[in-house]
Image (spheres, rainbow, N blue to C red):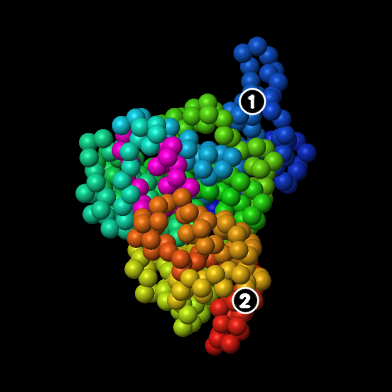
Amino acid sequence: MDFSTLCIHGSDKKYDTTGAVSVPIFQSATFAHPGVGLSTGFDYTRSQNPTREYLEQTVAKLEGGFDAIAFSSGMAAVTTLMELFSPGDHIIATDDIYGGSHRLFRHVSGKNGLTFDFVDTSDINNIRERIKPETRAVFIETPTNPMMHVTDISAVAGLCRANNLMLIVDNTFLTPYFQKPLLLGADVVLHSGTKYLGGHNDTLAGFLVVSGEDLSERLRFLSKTTGACLSPFDSWLMIRGIKTLAVRLDRQQQTAFRIAQWLKKQHRIKAVHYPGLPDHPGYEISKKQTSGFGAMLSFETDCSETARRVLENLSVIQYAESLGGVESLITYPMLQTHADIPAVEREARGIGECLLRLSVGLESADDLIDDLDKALNGGNADV
């Protein structure tokens, strides 16, 4: 079945007899038992709910996974994932990683006895050199947030198999429409569903998609026990958002490529980081492991004054955290998403006072370029 069709008809399970085209919102905390020792398959919404089950089955099919588990946020998903590990376990993670994940690993998981090495995973040798007897997993983000580095998933998966390590891939930026890490050898795929899967900047959600039954059972036990489940109504909002995932990403990617090309021509822009540009270091790997380059890009201005002028003079593009929605959003990573990373580490990774991250939405490409032009050049640039 085509991906676009799966987005709309991802689960074929029916939950009522009315013929409703939209899956119902089962806004119930608990479910009655038909008899002693009997169950309808649903007992308590923290364990499972029909609306959430429909969503999870859809996401699992989109990723080509055995199972998907929906959480109240992306951070709730990764927090639960870390409960698979025990004190003393070691994890190798991408260094240019979402600031929230970095904060969790360093301040919460570290407190709980886990240890981490943060490395540039776009060079597999950096991973290989950090493996030690207590290493249990490799956690990669590709493309990375915000520098858009690309990691070869298949190569890392081979290294993980050879060393009996779990491979976890954050697939938030590309979604299963453009990239399917499980089919490339990953064990767990992580999503902030708040972003492209929901697509409308109106719902928090997170997902863990797993390759096999053992991980499914372990994570469902943890999800039920720790309790950060996605509510029925938010599950319904995610189902609705996913229906348009393919068409949204096609359009957003087209616009992102135009903007990236335009930015490269501007004299006040010193670098553009977008995997769809042929001069991007990860371009060839991206072509090999993805079907598209996505709609996220970062760019570096000539000075901090220019970066701040852009942020303060945009009118169509909104200065706000998050990404992946129909509205274009621009962020200042050093002050927002990555503010908790120590300045020395942040700047060593290129996340300085001149870097801006742009999530391209569904507005007209001409309007977005005109907005950037006015903010950057006063409207005098050659489009």
Residue type of the residue flagged with mark 2: Asp
- Label 2 neighbourhood size at 10 Å, few (<14), some (14-19), many (20+)? many
Residue 362 belongs to the span the image colors magenta: no
The alpha-carbon separation of the residues under discs 2 and 1 comes to 49 Å
Residue 94 belongs to the span the image colors magenta: yes
- The structure residue drawn at horizontal position 46% and vertical position 83%, both measured from the top left corner, is 267
Image check: 85 left or right of 5? left
Question: Disc number at residue 371?
Answer: 2
Label 2 SS? helix
Q: Position of residue 198 (x, y in %)?
A: 61, 52
Q: Earlier in the sequence, mark 2 or mark 1?
A: 1
Q: Is residue 250 visible?
A: no
Q: Is residue 234 visible?
A: yes
- The structure residue drawn at horizontal position 56% and vertical position 30%, both measured from the top left corner, is 227
Question: Disc number at residue 117?
Answer: none
Label 1 SS? loop
Using the image, determine if residue 161 lies above or below residue 336: above
Question: Disc number at residue 44?
Answer: 1
Q: Quadrant of the C terminus?
A: bottom right
Give the number of marks. Answer: 2
- The structure residue drawn at horizontal position 35% and vertical position 35%, both measured from the top left corner, is 114
Q: Position of residue 316 (x, y in %)?
A: 66, 70
Magenta region: which residues? 89-109
Q: Are marks 2 and 1 in contact (CB under 8 Å)?
A: no
- The structure residue drawn at horizontal position 28% and vertical position 38%, both measured from the top left corner, is 135
Q: Nearer the viewer, residue 189 or 263?
A: 263
Q: Position of residue 280 (x, y in %)?
A: 37, 70
